[in-house]
Image: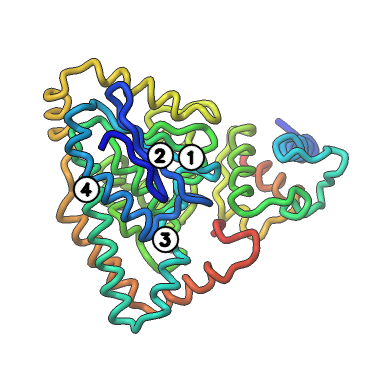
Amino acid sequence: MKTIEQTTDEVLNLAATHFKVARAELQPGDDFYKKLGIDSLQALELLTRLENHFGVELPDYEVQGVSDFQTLATRIQARL
Amino acid sequence: MNDYQGKTLAWRLCDGVVELALNRAPANEIGLAMLDDLERFVSALPALESKASALILHSEQKAGFSAGADLRELYGQAQKMDSSAAAKGVREFLERIHAVLNRLDTSPLTTIAAVHGVCFGGGFELALACDLIVADKMARFCFPELRLGLIPGFGGIPRLKRDIGNGVVRDLLLTGRSINATKGLAVGLVSQVAAEGEALRLARATAAQTAKFDRATAAAAKRFIKPLPAEELRREIDLFCELFARPAVMEGLRKFVENAGPHPYLP
């Protein structure tokens, strides 16, 4: 089973790859809306990529109010 | 009219398949302009049906198949009228869109929605009027209407109930959550999942397969297996109009329209 650190790292890697941001620029505590420059439709795209990557379902309301990578990773970890 | 280029969509007939491409930036919101174009398409449908075996609906917009009803237009129009006129306008719109979707639903052609990205609300309802949904793995399906104090009004509930288990319908409706294509496949909503960007190609391959069969037989089989839930569709319009009259709805629409933040599509 993945550790939370591994999950967080994979979240950051995936976000960097798909939104074409340098991985080194992303930290767990960063606001992903601001750092990736995305809106809610693109946030749904991120959600879908994360679900597909981790093989989990992540209902939208689970990420309501979530805007940083670390908390997002915690939500995913809870479903692994 | 085999080919047509409208303001919000285009269609063409090619090798016995009609392809209807939605193309209204940013996310194929369904308002009056798209309704006009859809009605134009439905008028042309009988002639197209005599020459084709399948119809594919897809989107040219990057954001997805369709984000649903044009809520900004709805709010803007309602603001200009008294509540009685607004209610009448809403009912008229619903009657028109239901006529379009019912006609698509009952077409003798095999109809396939090729879905990518957002397929929300009225957009989801447009896809549900089709016989098959082929989705790429980035597709998301959602009925967000309860967030606005409404229910799906374009026929989504009766059509979804026709296709999948009531438990899943309740989940989608009562939580307003979106589900991805993999989940859609698991519950029987989506018939095939394609790689990202491949839904249209897969829909074309599926259309080519269905074209091998005798059209009259396929049309008869479709009429048998896919009854139109006419009574429930009528009741849905009535319930939607009843809910629309509540002040909470206009407040919900106002919040959506005035939301300048990055979150309007999240619950």
Chain ID of residue with mark 3: B
Chain ID of residue with mark 2: B
Q: Earlier in the sequence, mark 3 or mark 2?
A: 2
Q: Nearer the viewer, residue B91 or B180?
A: B91
Q: Which residue has dot 1 on it? A: B60
Q: What's the distance in space between the residues labelled 3 and 1, CA to CA? A: 24 Å
Q: Earlier in the sequence, mark 4 or mark 3?
A: 4
- Residue B79 lies in what quarter of the image? bottom left
Instruction: Identify the amino acid type marked 4.
Output: Asn
Q: Which residue has dot 3 on it? A: B145
Q: How is the image coloured?
A: rainbow
Q: Where in the figure is residue B35, as x and y percent of width and height?
A: 33, 55
| Residue depth check, mark 3 versus mark 2: number of the one nearer the observer | 2
Q: Which residue has dot 4 on it? A: B102
Discs 1 and 4 lie in a common subunit? yes
Instruction: Identify the amino acid type marked 1.
Output: Glu
Q: What's the distance in space between the residues labelled 1 and 4, CA to CA? A: 24 Å
Name of the residue lying farthest toward the right: A24
